[in-house]
Amino acid sequence: MQNLSNQLKNNEFIQRIIFGILYATAFLFCVLHKNNIFFISLIIILLIGSICEFVNLTTIRKMNFFNILILIIIVFSFFCLIQIKISEKNPFQLIILLTQVWAIDCGGYFIGKLFGKRKFSKISPSKTLEGLFGSFIFSILTIYILNNKWQMIENNIILFVMLIFSSSVFGDLIFSKIKRMHKRKNSGLFLPGHGGFLDRLDSLIISTPIFYLYIYYF
């Protein structure tokens, strides 16, 4: 029984790696391609998939004010992604945002798996303080490496890191809370090994509007 459990965990880890690479590659290709139709098409697919997962997760009968608000945030977040791509001042704006969110996710996942002992929140039992620290370190290292190359963030770089870091963690917790409220482990069946679009995009959904406001209005 223990061997079967370990095999399932190993298969899930392999799926996570494979589909994570495919997801990141597709995203980066669409971001870097000069023809915006590729990026817009990807965003529409992710938006439709995320809405379907969220409606399925919460069920139509429970569409209260909170759920409607989350739906509005999801739509607005994808709208911001398209706006950043179409009107970007710098071709690497979205790269900065994506790598920040992915660094935070990867830092939390790998450091948490390797060293995690102290639980961070009851909302998401798998999250640990060690993983949270790993997320923050990965975030700082990533922004300093990329910003040194592209000079995207000219000042208040620490404020920028704190905003993206806190909004990413907050997004993760929000959707973890929603899943726990509806007694679900995953948000959907998309992206095997990642639990669905919302499980992969939860941090990005909340951090994107923050990034958009910071870049264009701060």
Image (tube, grey):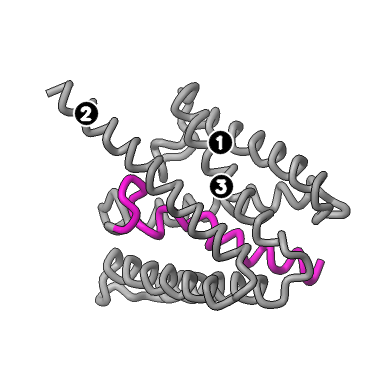
Q: Which residues are magenta?
A: 190-218
Q: Amino acid at mark 1?
A: Gly
As for residue 89 lying within the magenta part, the answer is: no
Q: Are marks 1 and 2 in contact (CB under 8 Å)?
A: no
In terms of secondary structure, where does tag 3 sit? helix
User: Looking at the rendering, in which quadrant would you find the N terminus?
Assistant: top left
Tell me the CA gap for discs 3 and 1.
8 Å
Q: Position of residue 32 (x, y in %)?
A: 63, 63
Specify few, some or many for label 1: CA neighbours under 10 Å numbering under 14, 14-19, or 20 or more.
many
Tell me the kind of residue under disc 3. Answer: Trp
How would you rate the neighbour count of disc 2 (Cα within 10 Å): few for under 14, some for 14-19, many for 20 or more?
A: few
- First in sequence, mark 1 or 2: give its number: 2
Question: Which is more N-terminal, label 1 or label 3?
Answer: 3
Quadrant housing residue 140: top right
Q: Is residue 34 above or below residue 173?
A: below
Residue shown at 74%/46% (left/top)?
146
Q: Which residue is mark 3?
A: 102
Q: As rendered, which of 23 and 73 lies closer to the eye?
A: 23
Tell me the CA gap for discs 1 and 2. 24 Å
The C terminus lies in quadrant: bottom right
Pair 1/2: label in front:
2
**Nearer to the camera, 52 or 62:** 52
What residue sits 22% from the left and 28% below the top? 7
Which residue is disc 1 drawn over? Answer: 107
Query: Residue pushed farthest right?
Result: 155
Q: Residue at x 80, y 52 (%)?
A: 150
Closest to the observer, 78 or 160: 78
Vertical relation: 171 (above or below) 75: above
Circles 3 and 1: CB atoms closer than 8 Å: no
Q: Residue at x 69, y 53 (%)?
A: 163
Place residue 88 in its image quadrant: bottom right
Spot occupied by residue 77 in the image (x, y as percentages of width and height): 56, 70
